[in-house]
Image: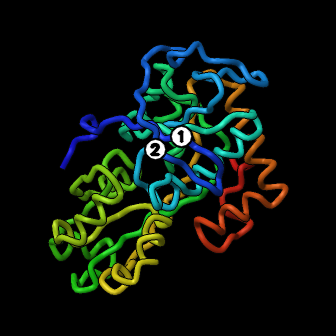
Amino acid sequence: MKTLLGRRTRLLAATTATAGLVLVVAGCSSNGNGGSGGATVKGVHLVKAGQLTTCTHLPYPPFQSEINGKVQGFDVSLIDLVAKNLGVKQQIVDTPFENFKTGAFLNSGQCDLAAAGMTITPERKKNVDFSDPYFEATQAVLVDKNSGINSLADVKAKGKKLGAQAQTTGEDYVKGKGYDPISFESSDAVLNGLRTGQVQAVVIDYPVVQGWLKDKANADKFKVVDNLKTGEQYGFTVKKGNTALREAIDKALKDAKADGTYKKIYEQWIGPYKASVASPAAS
């Protein structure tokens, strides 16, 4: 298993929410101005002129993943709205997830914002500024149907192995409950660990599990035995003190909720929409 620090940064360029994203062969500058001097658009400073540069961590469906060679997903579509309001295109940089907790790529000027299905926590708020919440999440426990596991408690009681994605709140949650999960680098690696029998159960965000179970081969072999309501809300992040961009994100979310765009995007990527879900006005 590759370590998080061993992942190579990749840059992906966005077109539109419907057309998705295409891979661009390019590197990331460590210059605080993104290597091109940046630009200010509608009061928002961008690290590279003409684009809104977004850090993410692939794959994490349905929030962001490569589909037919293009990066698409719930987060991608929402940030496309922000880019559209600024009159620029979104560009996506694939980075290690741990950088989202520290704000490293934001602080170095490699990205304007981070969008990675990231839970808002007091610890993370010390390093980055969050947008308004845009999604409410729960953690699901997915198991092999032949494992004999019927709950999270069964994992420990029956001496089974539990997996989780490294550096995530799902991993933190089960550790806080006394479990010692096997850590995997990405959501795909988590599922592969379950497929290959490295673990007999995994804990990960429920929408991710929903996406997996749309595949009949997965639905035939795996099942959800617990849905852990952890009170999590996702937010996009910007560098500490980047008020202009944070407010631009919040405005895009608020407008999308008001005109029905958010509901349309939600149903495209997540599933049936409930008005109580992920209100951007939530605290």
Residue 43 is left or right of residue 1, and the answer is: right
Q: Which mark is residue 191?
A: none
Q: Earlier in the sequence, mark 2 or mark 1?
A: 1
Q: Is there any visible trace of residue 52 in the rendered image?
A: yes
Percent of width and height locating residue 53: 56, 32
Residue corresponding to mark 1: 13
Residue located beneath label 2 in the image: 23
Given the image, on which type of amino acid does mark 2 rest?
Leu
> Does residue 118 show up?
no
Classify 6 as above or below 217. Answer: above
| Residue 144 coordinates in the image, percent (x, y) | 26, 79
Residue drawn 17% across the image and 71% down it:
197
Quadrant location of residue 91? top right
**Residue placed furthest toward the front:** 25
**Residue at 47% of width from left, 70% of height from top?**
211
Q: Quadrant of residue 217?
A: bottom left
The amino acid type, in three-letter code, at marker 1 is Ala
Q: Are marks 2 and 1 in contact (CB under 8 Å)?
A: yes
Above or below, comparing residue 241 to residue 156 in the picture: above
Residue sitting at x 60%, y 36%: 130
C-alpha distance separating marks 2 and 1: 6 Å
Report crowding for label 2: few under 14, some 14 to 19, many 20 or more residues within 10 A (C-alpha).
some
SS class of the residue under badge 1? strand
Place of residue 92 in the rendered image (x, y in percent of width and height, measured from the top left): 51, 39
Q: Please tell me whether residue 195 is drawn above or below residue 132 in the rendered image.
A: below
Q: Residue furthest right?
A: 259
Q: Nearer the viewer, residue 101 or 85?
A: 85
The kind of secondary structure element at disc 2 is strand
